[in-house]
Image: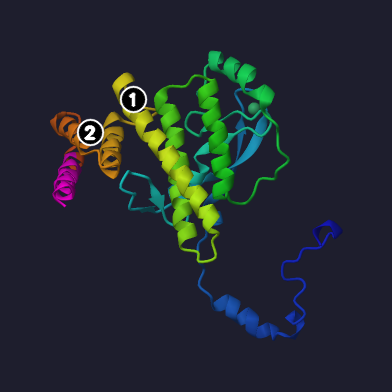
Amino acid sequence: MEKFGFSMDGELDILADDKPKKEAEAAKKAAPVVKQEKDFIIDKKVRCPVCDKEFPIKAVLATKLKRLEPDFDLRPNYEHVDKCKYDFISCPKCGYSALDTTFSKIDTARVKLIRAEFCPSFKPQQEELQETYSYEYSIEKFKLALICTMKKRAKMSEKAYVCLKIAWLRRAQLKELEGNKDADPKVIEMVKKEYDGFYAQAYEGFMKAISQETPPYCGMASEAVEFMLANMSVYYKKYDAAMKIIARLIQSASTSRKLKDKCLELKEQIVAEQGE
Ligand SMILES: [Zn+2]
């Protein structure tokens, strides 16, 4: 129907005119206002440092968000919005993509690398910016960002962080799919496989980064990254690696009291898991 200029959405309900209208309107008014993702999304414009074109993006109005308990590996969670979906910027004209925090912070040598090794193969898509981003849409862009980190010879921490964001998105998507009884098992399997693959790369990448780079790691404080890695090590049942990181954090003068307490909690968890 769409090619004829008609939308199928609700317009072909032959009983629609028979429904008592006033009743429906009253019900609408009485319903409580439920906040939705789109209520926290704003329009922004960004200039691309590679092709110098300006383009629109969607961004999260972070000040309005209510923080929820993070996941075990510090993945941030917010009420109504999965902010991770908006943590990238991708130029629709030349394809250059990156984490939102690193997009504009690219030096001229790396701009040249992107222009020479990435842009020539990029095929621009005719796609309209949606009101909110879907998981598939964001993950596609994060994958472009990952290719860009390799082409621009980014530090390991930046590559690992992009992998982590993809894994975090796949994890959230998996949760959503598993709660939907109509979800296609093949899709669930693909999402899970990608989650495992990108999560493993993020773990290995960050482990390498903390041994090779000087902090901050892609903008993150070393204590935060190390505590995250301790938790990820526990996830992989690499208890020795976790214990080593925890010992270092507890001994360090720059670790906050609060984080030291969390380290002690994690240590107890490891002892309990190993005793099982
Ligand atoms: Zn561009």
Residue at 63% of width from left, 16% of height from top?
A: 116
Q: Above or below — where is 206 with respect to 77?
A: above
Q: Secondary structure at mark 2?
A: helix
Q: Decide whether residue 273 is among the magenta residues.
A: yes
Residue ranking furthest to the right: 4
Q: At x 45% / y 51%, what residue is drawn?
A: 172
Residue at horizontal 16%, vertical 46%?
274
Residue 227 shows in the view: yes
- Residue drawn 58% across and 16% down? 113
Pointer 2: what residue? 241
Give the left or right position of residue 8, taking residue 86 as reference. Answer: right
Viewer-closest of 60 and 2: 2
Going by the image, does 66 lie left or right of 253? Answer: right
**Which quarter of the rendered image does ligand 1 occupy?**
top right
Q: Is residue 148 magenta?
A: no
Q: Nearer the viewer, residue 35 or 225?
A: 225
Mark 1 is on which residue type?
A: Lys
Q: Is residue 67 left or right of residue 57?
A: left
Residue numbers of the magenta segment: 260-276
Q: Is residue 169 shown to the viewer in this render? A: no
Residue 191 position, x and y percent, is 50, 49
Which residue is identified by label 1?
A: 208
Quarter of the image with the N terminus in it: bottom right
What number is the disc on residue 148? none
Amino acid type shown at disc 2? Ala
Question: Observer-nearest residue: 189 or 214?
Answer: 189
- Cβ at disc 2 under 8 Å from ligand 1: no
